């Protein structure tokens, strides 16, 4: 089984900002865009599926239904 998901952190304020888990752990935990309504607010954790490119909330069990 291949692991096709990775953790990332995104801003939900609409600026499109996101950081990798590595950057988040290095201290980049809040939005840094002064024009964003969520400036200074913490990023939210997402599970990024590298297979289909979707970002899902952590609690959501992302899976592919098109497998036969
Ligand atoms: Zn933002
Ligand atoms: Zn997927």
Image (spheres, rainbow, N blue to C red):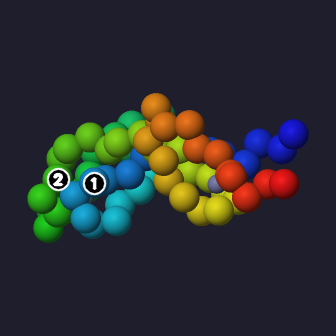
Is 31 situated left or right of 28 in this image?
left
Q: Quadrant of residue 43?
A: top left
14 vs 46, left or right, is left
In the rendered structure, the answer to whether residue 21 lies left or right of residue 57 reads right
Q: Which residue is mark 2?
A: 38
Residue 12's disc number: 1
Residue 47: give x, y in percent of width and height. Answer: 53, 44
Q: Nearer the viewer, residue 36 or 65?
A: 65
Disc sitting over residue 41 in the figure: none
Please tell me which residue lies in front, 23 or 3: 3
For the point 45% across and 52% down, the residue is 19
| Residue 57 position in % (x across, y down) | 44, 42
Above/below status of 42 relative to 38: above
Quarter-wise, where is residue 51 in the image?
Answer: bottom right
| Mark 1 within 8 Å of ligand 1, using the beta carbon | yes
Q: Are marks 2 and 1 in contact (CB under 8 Å)?
A: yes
- Which residue is found at the position 84% from the left and 54% from the top? 68
Q: In the drawing, does residue 27 fall left or right of residue 64?
A: left
Whole-percent x, y for residue 22 in the image: 55, 41
Q: How many marks?
A: 2
Label 2: element kind: loop
Q: Position of residue 66 (x, y in %)?
A: 73, 58
The relative height of residue 42 versus residue 34 in the rendered view (above or below) is: above
Q: Is residue 20 visible?
A: no
Label 2 CB-ligand 1 distance < 8 A: yes
Label 2 to label 1: alpha-carbon separation: 7 Å
């Amino acid at each position: 089984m291949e692991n096709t998901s990775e953790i990332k952190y995104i801003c939900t304020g609409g600026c499109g900002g996101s950081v990798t888990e590595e950057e988040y752990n290095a201290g980049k935990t809040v939005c840094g865009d002064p024009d964003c309504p969520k400036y200074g607010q913490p990023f939210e954790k997402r599970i990024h599926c590298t297979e289909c490119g979707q970002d899902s909330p952590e609690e959501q069990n992302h899976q592919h239904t098109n497998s036969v």
